[in-house]
Image: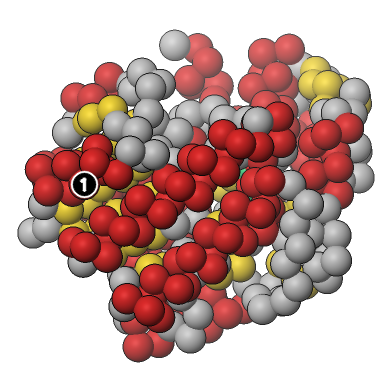
Amino acid sequence: MKKILVTGAVGQIGSELTMYLRKKHGNENVVAVGHRTKPSEKLLNSGAFEFLKIEDINEVENAIKKYNIGTIYHLAAILSAIGEKNPQLAWDVNINGLYNILEVSRKYKCSLFVPSSIGAFGPSTPADNTPQDTIQRPTSMYGVTKVAGELLCDYYYTRFNVDTRGVRYPGLISYETLPGGGTTDYSVEIFYEAIKNKQYTCFLKHDTMLDMMYMPDAIKGCVDLMEADPAKLKHRNAFNLTAVNFTPEQIATEIKKHIPEFQIDYDVDPIRQAIADSWPNHMDDSAAREEWGWNPKYDLELMTKDMLEKLEIKLKK
Ligand code: VAH
């Protein structure tokens, strides 16, 4: 069996995706790579791990050859808030890094998963029930790299027949690994603070509506897409994908059902508020449902219950 490579394997998605794939395909068949953040013992002890710079094509190519890689889940990226503080870094990692991954995928005939995001949309995009195919004029550097990435991946599919596939993820909520500098990070921080301090100061306005998803749905979604029958895919990259959508006020109300004394207040960060305001309220993900059976399991109630239960255990350790 050709092996699987996960880039960004120490990140919020990559750390859980690596363990999911190792359980599904065997530890020896999934190689994890990170940039510099120290991996967990669990990740290190369950299979091959290497540090590499995706901006260096020779390092990427050496890993592909060394491990005989057949499928790449490319999750290494700079997220929206950090990207707005350092747009040149965001371009270098999110585009030059992606270009290297696409080139080695072309050369070694690897299948490739690359996530896009609701960040690929902008203020002129229809905000409600955002169509699969619509206007994309993002106003953040993160969004620019996501649209360019979508187009690059489509190009490598049509021009070089590289098996590229991808989704537009909403904000992702998980308890294993903290998110790394995104605009939706409040939706994870709020759970930690609710348990630890019974209080959270949110950096977005109370009524900021955004699409969100619990990590188990996000992981199953990307693997299901990579295993889908290619003959049924009318789209390739950037499937709209959502599961729930809520405002900070609404998730706080759901948390209060479990922690009645929990209080939320607001100290709005203008940079992240401007990014969030440029994104849709809710995407139409019918194309993913029709073309490869996307069907998320976690709604706000189920996710909140599970997050609090798992975090209570984690924070007691
Ligand atoms: C971010 N969590 O906030 C990421 C994601 C949809 C948001 O792309 O930048």
Q: Is residue 287 above or below residue 197?
A: below
Compared with 152, 74 (above or below) is: above
Q: Is residue 240 left or right of residue 25?
A: right
Residue 64 image point, x, y percent: 18, 48
Residue closer to the observer: 62 or 208: 62
Identity of the residue drawn at 90% across and 23% down: 267
Task: Check the image and report above or below for 51 versus 3.
Answer: above
Q: Quadrant of the C terminus?
A: top left
Q: Name the residue located 18 percent from the left edge and 42 percent from the top edge.
A: 63
Q: Quadrant of residue 2?
A: bottom left
Image position of 78 (left or right of 130): left
Q: Quadrant of the N terminus?
A: bottom left
Task: Please indicate, yes or no, whether residue 19 appears anywhere in the rendered image.
Answer: no
The type of colouring in the image is secondary structure
Neighbourhood count class around disc 1 (C-alpha, 10 Å): few under 14, some 14–19, many 20 upward: some
Query: Would you name the residue on which mark 1 appears?
Result: 61
Q: Quadrant of residue 48?
A: top left
Q: State the residue at coordinates (24%, 41%).
A: 58
Q: Residue at x 33, y 23 (%)?
A: 39
The answer to whether residue 137 of the structure is visible from this angle is yes
| Residue 148 shown left or right of residue 121 in the figure | left
Residue 94 placement (x, y as % from top left): 51, 46
Q: Amino acid at mark 1?
A: Glu
Observer-nearest of 271 and 252 = 271
Ligand 1's image quarter is top right
Q: How many marks?
A: 1
Disc 1 residue lies near ligand 1 with CB under 8 A: no
